[in-house]
Image (cartoon, rainbow, N blue to C red):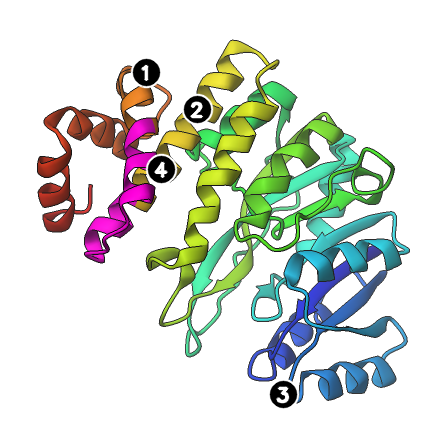
Amino acid sequence: MVSIIVPAYNAEQYLERTISSILSQSETDWELLLIDDGSTDTTPALCRKYAADDPRIRAYHQANAGPSAARNYGISLARGEYLTFLDADDILHPDFLEVTLQAASECNARIVATSFYNFHQDTEIRHQPIPSTLHALTLDTGHALQALFYQKKLDEKGTFLDTSAWDKLFRRDVWVGEDAPKFREGIRYEDLDVIYQAIICAGGVTCLPYKMMGYRQHQQSFIHTFSESRRDVLDVTDKIVTDLADMSRDVIKAAKTRRFAAHYNILNLLYRAHRQDTATEERCLKVIRENRRDVLFNRHARLQDRAGALLAYLGQRAMRIIVRLTRI
């Protein structure tokens, strides 16, 4: 059985479509844990309604504490051998559970990662057909961490390992135990903060190239705008580099490249938003300057990261001007 954990906060506008995608799964051996995170709209009533209609669905309520706390709570309640996470505004491919369970069995994998597609409220969803013979790429811990941090396609099929907790199937034992990873509460980028730990715990990951989760795009996406909480990515990527200091040289290089990309992106957003934040600007510039040479000559780094590293040699004033005029 698969435990599907869905935190929900004020999700009345989207939750029914999300649950519908779960009810439409070709694999029927699942349980759905709806964790209402202190919603003030009709979300709690919707959760109770679906739980009353289907014995596989259970509804729980907690005071508002954020998605990490809701996911941790869901993990503690899960009964399945496997589990997966889904946000309350996203949707699953109807074969997600069947395909990932097949890959887990065939590859003896504790984590199976798929891919995702973006959609908007009015998007007509046409699910990708999945072949009966799966194209699966299994990576050991070191290669999986490098794939995670370099954020590049892994083969000609478009296989990609992203840093999200959703679009993946996990053996439940990855998340259970004294040393098991936990979602850190009170921060943004909670997925980036924990997924590398889960991969280490699992001893690697099996990746599938199929787009099996729909990621809803909102008009004001958190990813594309600057906010105070976006600084959390600086702490998260600093911690990654520290945590992986005893790993192989290749893994450390990949982690530092991801850290460079995070600091460069935040600096980008500051400049584009015309924000005056000297402390954050100096913090980002310090990491960029320390790592620009390594990133520039790292053939595994994304082209955009290497372009940013090159731009960093032009000086702070030039960077500010060019960033505002381009997408580098």
Rounded to the nearest angstrom, the CA distance separating label 4 from label 2 is 11 Å
Q: Say whether marks 2 and 3 touch (CB < 8 Å).
A: no
CB atoms of marks 4 and 3 within 8 Å: no
Q: CA distance from mark 3 to mark 1?
A: 50 Å
Indicate the position of residue 183 as horizontal and vertical percent values.
Answer: 68, 48
Label 2, label 3: how many angstroms apart (C-alpha)? 42 Å
Residue sitting nearer the eye, 15 or 281: 281
Q: Do the CB atoms of the residues marked 3 and 1 lie less than 8 Å apart?
A: no
Look at the magenta stretch and give its main secondary structure: helix
Sequence-wise, which precedes: disc 3 or disc 1? 3
Residue 271 colored in magenta in the image: yes
Q: Up-down: is 221 above or below 157?
A: below
- Residue bearing mark 2: 256
Disc 1 marks which amino acid? Asp
Q: Mark 3 = which residue?
A: 41
Q: Residues within 10 Å of mark 4 (few under 14, many from 20)?
A: many
In this figure, what is the number of numbered marks?
4
Could you tell me residue 269's position as x and y percent? 28, 51
Residue at figure coordinates x 74%, y 30% from the top left: 201
Seen from the viewer's position, the closer of residues 156 and 196 is: 196
> Are dots 1 and 2 in contact, CB under 8 Å?
yes
Tell me which residue sits at (35%, 25%) in the image: 301
Q: Which SS class for mark 2?
A: helix
Q: Quadrant of the N terminus?
A: bottom right
| Label number found at residue 294 | 1
Circle 4 is placed at which residue position? 263
The amino acid pointed to by label 4 is: His
Distance from label 4 to label 3 (Cα)?
37 Å
Which portion, as a residue range, is magenta? 267-286
Badge 4 or badge 1: first in the primary sequence: 4
